Image (cartoon, rainbow, N blue to C red):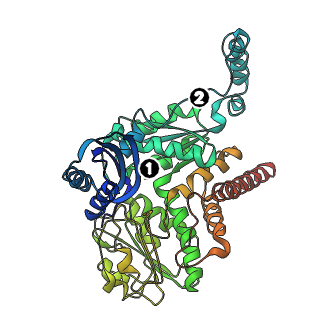
Amino acid sequence: MPVPGPGYSITVRLEAPPSASAAGDLTTAVGRVGGVLTAFDVVESHADAIVVDITANVSSADHAEGITNALDELPGVRVRKVSDRTFLMHLGGKLEVSPKVDLRNRDDLSRAYTPGVARVCRAIAANPSDARRLTIKRNTVAVVSDGSAVLGLGNVGPEAALPVMEGKAALFKKFAGVDAWPVCLDTQDTEEIIATVRALAPVYAGINLEDIAAPRCFEIEARLRDQLDIPVFHDDQHGTAIVVVAALRNALRVVGKPIEKCRIVVSGVGAAGSAIIRLLRRKSPADIVAVDIDGVVHAGRDGLDDNLRWVAEHTNAEGTTGTLHDALVGADVFIGVSAPNLFGAEQVATMADNAVVFALANPDPEIDPLEAQRHAAVVATGRSDYPNQINNVLAFPGVFRGLLDAQAHHIDDDMLLAAANAIADVVDDRLNASFIVPSVFDAAVAPAVAEAVRAAARGEAERAEAVTSTT
């Protein structure tokens, strides 16, 4: 179900005859083969020819080639060059390091570096907690990946994961002013990852784990949380869970159903699905039924790993068995974080009235959104070209902004729920079936999430201090 979008955007530089019909001929050729024209610029004009840059959104590399060929075949037209705008954005990487202080003369140098810096080193050696006040640690997060589960690409390794981690770091800075840095590790051994992150931790005030395959990601996160005195947050788990819970709160407001009376089906029980289930349980739904590639997860199923055993023990109160299609019958909510094209409109028709469908597999969802809309009252996807995009960028920048501001040492479910509620509240009176979460570019989101997480973190710290003082 690929559609033209900015992820596949090309600029074609070509020569064309200087005729009155040239612009129309060129734009018609792009439209005839399904391209979406976004810019038409004449960059040179001569007596016998014009040089034009045509920019268009396409759906794939093959589609881009088809558009280029359609232009090149026009009489008198010669394509000079085709540029992929996504690759152009990545040339040389998307990040740089810039000093926050001026180094204009010897005086500046002697304070920023030797000999003055030695005094700061001694102060931190005497009181290590001063590192948060006197170094980049105060505002810096490590974005850690082993490249084993990158987007929808799978196990592509650390080098291929780097563009994603760069993008993540750029989003941290753009939306919350957090300095984040990619840490792509050339190992997929659990013990080596834990040891490496532990060794790197003194530089950072938070660890954002990213694109690490399940089930290793569960152990890595749990053990790092035990061993480090800074928050460890696996975005594929908790970022997704936060936004899903926020969106579901508003979707259920649209259809007028309390979550306590809703039966929820979750397709996909890896990192994201498991975290969604764990956070949803804090909202006390009537039941959650989890489904993976082998069918409904239940206590009597053979071959369950530790994660699936936990899911089986804490979901499926009615003992449902069978396939995803079986589980959907009578369900109020479907949440998919699994694979494309798993069911169609006929299965949505078997769900309860005013059903909610979150088909979040990327780039192709579990069901075509247009098919889901035939019977569901609210539909959401992970895509930017449909309403109700469930996007982690609504969560992680503000979450870490709040954690850093609170100088938090850990993160818990109360903070995750505070973040979810803050995202849901930003929608306010704009709520409708096509607007259950705010835009990722809504400037109110990150500050609202940060404030909610900061308050929850400080409340937790105050409660811990009160307990300590009474023992």
Relative to residue 194, is residue 269 depicted above or below?
A: below
Image coordinates of residue 429 in percent, x first then y, are 67, 76
Image coordinates of residue 239 in percent, x first then y, are 52, 57
439 with respect to 310 (left or right): right
Q: Nearer the viewer, residue 304 or 200?
A: 200
Relative to residue 48, is residue 365 depicted above or below?
A: below
SS label for mark 2: loop
275 with respect to 410 (left or right): left
Q: Nearer the viewer, residue 416 or 435?
A: 435
The three-letter amino acid code for the residue at tag 2 is Ser
Quarter of the figure with residue 291 = bottom left
Image coordinates of residue 350 in percent, x first then y, are 36, 89
SS label for mark 1: helix
- Res 103 seen here: yes
Image coordinates of residue 289 in percent, x first then y, are 41, 76
Quarter of the figure with residue 256 = bottom right
Q: Nearer the viewer, residue 464 or 438?
A: 438
Q: Residue at x 45, y 74 (%)?
A: 315
Relative to residue 24, is residue 119 depicted above or below?
A: above
Residue on which disc 1 sits = 219
